[in-house]
Amino acid sequence: MDDFKVIFILAFAVESIWQGLKPAWPNKLKELEASYGIPVDALGCIVLALLLCLGTGADLLALVGVPLAVPYLGSILTAFLIYRGSNFMHDLLSKFNDFRNTSKPITWVEAGKGPDDEVK
């Protein structure tokens, strides 16, 4: 089970690294995305996922016992899963952050538990 935590951590790392690198994009990359529709976000995340998976030897298929005849294919496929997982992580963290910023704490009185709401 600890090996699956590594996959989760790699997906989180891809998301964190990519979000950290985005402000450093040269204007040329932004122009490619706007003018030609090249998905710079997707390509950047998949490249990071490939680097991390190949660099760490992460192979989800080997973890679940699927034998592969082609070396590194498992790491490459794992990179695509991590890429999609990083997208999921981004959406999840964005929703959590939005919830945290828009919700206000409820008081005991608002919950009906305060002294103003005592049963008579």
Image (spheres, rainbow, N blue to C red):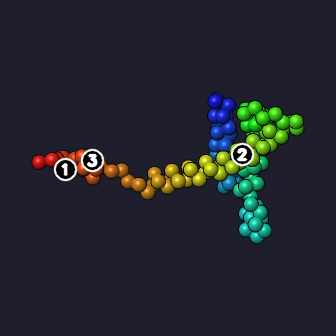
Please name the residue that numbered disc 2 is placed on.
81
Which residue type carries mark 1?
Answer: Asp
Disc count in the image? 3
90 lies above or below 76: below
Relative to 71, 18 lies left or right? left
- Closest to the observer: 53 or 64? 64
Percent position of residue 32, x then y: 77, 65
Residue that protrudes farthest toward the front in the picture: 66
Q: Residues within 10 Å of mark 3 (few under 14, many from 20)?
A: few
In front: mark 3 or mark 2? 2
Using the image, tell me which numbered label, if any, was put on residue 117.
1
Q: Quadrant of residue 12?
A: top right
Relative to 86, 59 lies left or right? right
For the N terminus, which image quadrant? Answer: top right
Percent position of residue 83, x then y: 71, 48
Which residue type carries mark 3?
Answer: Trp
Which residue type carries mark 2?
Answer: Leu
Percent position of residue 17, x then y: 67, 46
**Rendered residue at 67%/43% (across/down):** 11
Please name the residue that numbered disc 3 is placed on.
108
**Rendered residue at 67%/31% (across/down):** 3
Q: Are marks 3 and 2 in contact (CB under 8 Å)?
A: no
Q: Are marks 1 and 2 in contact (CB under 8 Å)?
A: no
Using the image, tell me which numbered label, if any, was put on residue 77.
none
Percent position of residue 78, x then y: 75, 41
**Of marks 1 and 2, which one's residue comes earlier in the chain?**
2
Relative to 72, 97 lies left or right? left
**Rendered residue at 51%/52% (across/down):** 97
